[in-house]
Amino acid sequence: MRTGDQVVQSLPWRWRAQGTIFVIGGLGFLFDAWDVTLNAFLIPLVSAEWGLSLGERGWVGTANLIGMAAGAFAWGAVADTIGRKKAFSLTILMFSVFTVLGAASPDFLTFCVFRFLAGVGLGGCIPVDFALVGEFTPAKVRGRVLAAMDGFWPLGATLCGLTAAFFADLGSWRMLMLTMVLPALLLFWIRRGVPESPMFLVTKGRPAEAKKVIDDLVARTGAPPEEWQLPEPQQAQRLSPKTMFAQLKDIWRFDPKRTGAMWLMFLAVFLLYYGAVTWLPSILKAQGYGTYAAFMVTTGTVAVGIVSSLISAWLVDVFGRKWVIAVTAPLASLALIMFALQINVDTAAKAWITLYGMLIQIAIPALYAFAPELYPTHLRASGFGWASTISRIGAAFVPVLLGAILWPRLGLPLTFAVIGVVVVGGVIMMMLTVPETKMQPLAEAVPS
């Protein structure tokens, strides 16, 4: 007799069932992308209002990304303790409240504090959303669906860019922040109807609720009913710093090579992404572009990700997660270096930065599909959350390090080459130590 989680993973895909959860989770991811990309457009606008130095400008992005790093760490552990559903809603609510307060900031220090706190809320969206969507998605399409989730990222980044371009002549960064709050609050209300993960309910000793969720899901997909059983529940942990670090210890005990490789890969890929995108409008303005033109080129760079995410969704189930990441991430590094080398040749520079945008946004969805599949149920959200945290921590300091230290001293080509070396190192370690998960069913316990 099959277990409940095996039944969930073998159900047919239906938009009215799993698809609804996918879309709601994806919209949260859209706001995550919007807010991260917003840093790139806020840097020139906020610096103009408060007369910031180059080093101070970096803190516009760094404060927000440090908050996201803290949020990715905290909310992954919170979701494994209080449930995906509650965490699913609270992340977006926290983000909305502090974004409104940030838009009303009277000075730069207050602005940075509220950007940090908004980041804490939104930083939890990625690990929580991917863990929940992944557990409701059938195994045969899981890689494709999780990779397709990342299609919401370039959509959010593109909406941010278009909004920024619209407000460019006004120089109104406050309106730029407020435009995303009302849709975010609407999403918070919609998220209240998302079911809790049945696999989480089982691990917390709530079998009746888990059975109801699974039975409802079977009925909504139109699958033939069958007899199934729930696995034995595990003892629930109470939320505390001790349990959070216990989860970290469990992640490393589960498979240190796997965890180390994924941490390095997350760090490398997001250094590559944030290092370029966060400073791209400023780099272009330094080359003589007007504000509107710089914003539109940046928007085009992230907008190609809409196509990239569809390509990635197909590639991960054809060639496997590892190979997609291993090929596209180093090529994206090379394209970025070529952009820096040919930045004075307008057509060539635009072609290279567009190619970079396409390649890096094929790698990221594949990485997001890959990471949650490497851990068992009780570590899935926190395992992904810790990996996301490491990437956010590294990326958080990119705005300051790149803008105030590396770019002025090394120049753009060498700065991007340093990041490229980290990417290649991460790929080598991943290929040697991490197993492929293509078409493998999620399990309560994943062999290490």
Image (tube, rainbow, N blue to C red):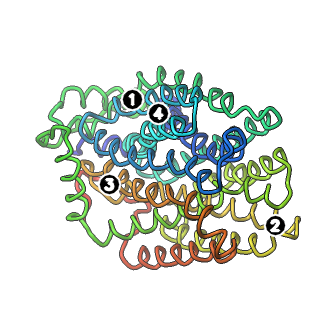
Q: Earlier in the sequence, mark 4 or mark 3?
A: 4
Q: Which residue is mark 3?
A: 383
Q: Residue 399's quadrant in the figure?
A: bottom right
Q: Secondary structure at mark 2?
A: helix
Q: Amino acid at mark 4?
A: Ile
> Looking at the image, which residue is at 69% across and 59% down?
357
Q: Earlier in the sequence, mark 4 or mark 1?
A: 4
Q: Earlier in the sequence, mark 1 or mark 2?
A: 1
Q: CA distance from mark 2 to mark 3?
A: 38 Å
Q: CA distance from mark 4 to mark 3?
A: 21 Å
Q: CA distance from mark 1 to mark 3?
A: 20 Å
Q: Which residue is mark 2?
A: 349
Q: Earlier in the sequence, mark 4 or mark 2?
A: 4
Q: Which residue is mark 4?
A: 21
Q: Amino acid at mark 3?
A: Gly
Q: CA distance from mark 1 to mark 2?
A: 42 Å
Q: Amino acid at mark 1?
A: Leu
In x, y percent, where is residue 67? Answer: 44, 44
Q: Which residue is mark 1?
A: 90
Relative to residue 93, is residue 148 depicted above or below?
A: below
Between residue 118 and residue 385, name the one nearer to us.
118
